Amino acid sequence: MKNILFAIATLFTLTLVSCRKEPVTVFPDYDKNWLAMEDNPNDPTIHANFQFYKETGIPVFVNDTIGSQTRVDVFGKTYTYYEVLSLSYSLGGLQSGPPPMVQSFTYCNKADVPTALAFLRAEIMPIIAGKIHVPSILLVENMSTNAFGTYAYKGLNTVAVAQISKIQAMSQTTKADYKAAILRAILTNTVLDNKYADILDKFYAVSRKFVSGRDAYGLNSFYLTSTYIVGLPAGTPFTFQAIGFLGPDARITSSSPISTWLDVCMYIEAASVNTDAQFKQKYAAYPNILTKYGYIRQILTDIGIK
């Protein structure tokens, strides 16, 4: 009898345990796609940016903090996580020299956003649509960088486009420079892809073959002498342009571009601001510049940039 009662009690206990619900752990969406824009019809700026996003697939922001989320740390305490667009990184494969960086920027006036969106639609999207992935665009007002001027900068997950309040009053010449800077920021990573490594090696070799005992990149102007520069036609002045550089490094003006990536950037921007005929006429006296330009044009053409 005792054994029967014990068996019944055990079965009853097991039944209670099996009916009890297990606690469900709900994990926050830490893998949220922060760049997927959400509309807000009550905010004209967000709504206009969302319309651009729907048309192009490119999210546009006016604040580098694009979202927040309540999270729990390893000690069980809650805190607020803020997702911030990164401007601390520019180009893959950075080889040498001080890294490019945004030194400062200021937020734009929302009233200037429609003009910026109209410029992007008219001047940039027809060139890159369907060819280049742009993770996002951050519209800002004033911006200072140590390598790429004040118009545009490619960060880790965004392209910063500055000076938007000045677009409407820009001359055609300034607009061409502005457009070229934005295209340079958008195109550089694609041009530097490993797919084009062989072409880029030929591009770098154009300048390197004229420098003896040193690398052509990061070459101080002190070494622009017959001791170090070899192979130029007789009577050719020893200049950075003569060995194929468009100019000195943007950060160290007494040196050739410190890194190969900056050399590429300078050529992309120059190719974007000039027509093919204009570029060839402008640099007609520098055959090595024209040779390097040909390699950049070869890559851009393969990408689909005409």
Image: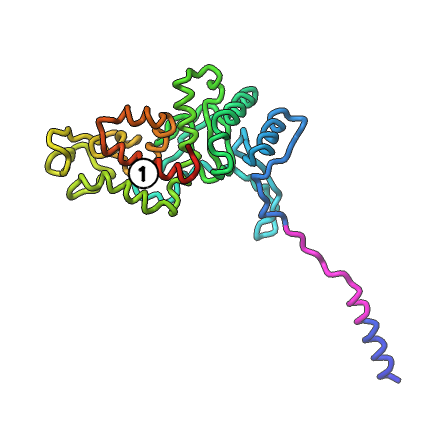
Residue 191 colored in magenta in the image: no
Task: Estimate the x, y position of residue 190 in percent, counting from the top left.
Answer: 42, 40
Relative to 42, 93 lies left or right: left
Name which residue lies at 49% across and 16% down: 168
Residue 19 colored in magenta in the image: yes
Name which residue lies at 16% across and 31% down: 238
Residue lying furthest right in this view? 1
Name which residue lies at 54% across and 28% down: 62
Q: Looking at the picture, which amino acid does disc 1 mark?
A: Tyr
Task: Estimate the x, y position of residue 68 in percent, counting from the top left.
Answer: 59, 39
Q: Which residue is mark 1?
A: 295
Q: Which residues are magenta?
A: 14-27
Q: Is residue 107 above or below residue 133?
A: above
Q: Residues within 10 Å of mark 1 (few under 14, many from 20)?
A: some
Q: Nearer the viewer, residue 248 or 271?
A: 271
Task: Estimate the x, y position of residue 252 in percent, counting from the top left.
Answer: 27, 31
Name which residue lies at 23% across and 38% down: 207
